Amino acid sequence: MSCPVSLCGVDEQLMEKLKKFRFRKETTNAALIIYSYRYKHTDGRTSYPLCFIFFSPCGCKPEQQMLYAGSKIGLVDVAEFTKVFEIRNTEDFSEEWLCKKLGFFR
């Protein structure tokens, strides 16, 4: 049986900023270290999913990727992110890419 490894703590001030960001009243796209996206569903509804998009470059050493993944897991768990996406090439990041990813969460 394995358990997730958290390699760093999450500061309470960051958690407070994330909470304020998550429940903000604006209806525009916005980013902090995460992305709040105005998503229009096919049935006409609009939602504002909070997306955690993490960049993991292809050229990193496996040890660095493991450290990064361990730190990311801790933040995702504490912040209770539900929309978590990894990207390996920044050129792939586009609105089309994000909509495709969000399409799985109807």
Image (cartoon, rainbow, N blue to C red):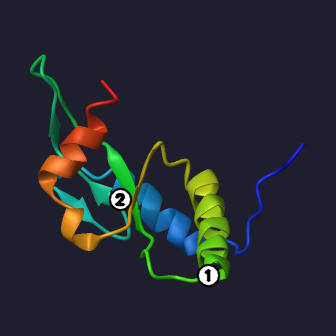
Decide: is 72 above or below 59: above
In the orientation shown, which residue stands out farthest toward the left?
A: 44
Quadrant (top left/top right/bottom left/bottom right) for the C terminus: top left
**Horizontal relation, residue 75 to residue 90: left or right:** right
Q: Amino acid at mark 2?
A: Phe
- The image position of residue 14, as x and y in percent, is 52, 71
- Secondary structure at numbered mark 2: helix
| Residue at which label 2 appears | 21
Work out whether residue 44 can be spotted.
yes
- For the residue pair 45 and 18, the one nearer the viewer reads as 45
In the rendered structure, find residue 64 and report the number of the disc placed on it. Answer: 1
**Disc 1 versus disc 2: distance between alpha carbons?**
29 Å
- The image position of residue 4, as x and y in percent, is 76, 54
Res. 90 image quadrant: bottom left
Disc 2 residue crowd, few under 14, some 14–19, many 20+, Cα 10 Å = some
Disc 1 residue crowd, few under 14, some 14–19, many 20+, Cα 10 Å = few
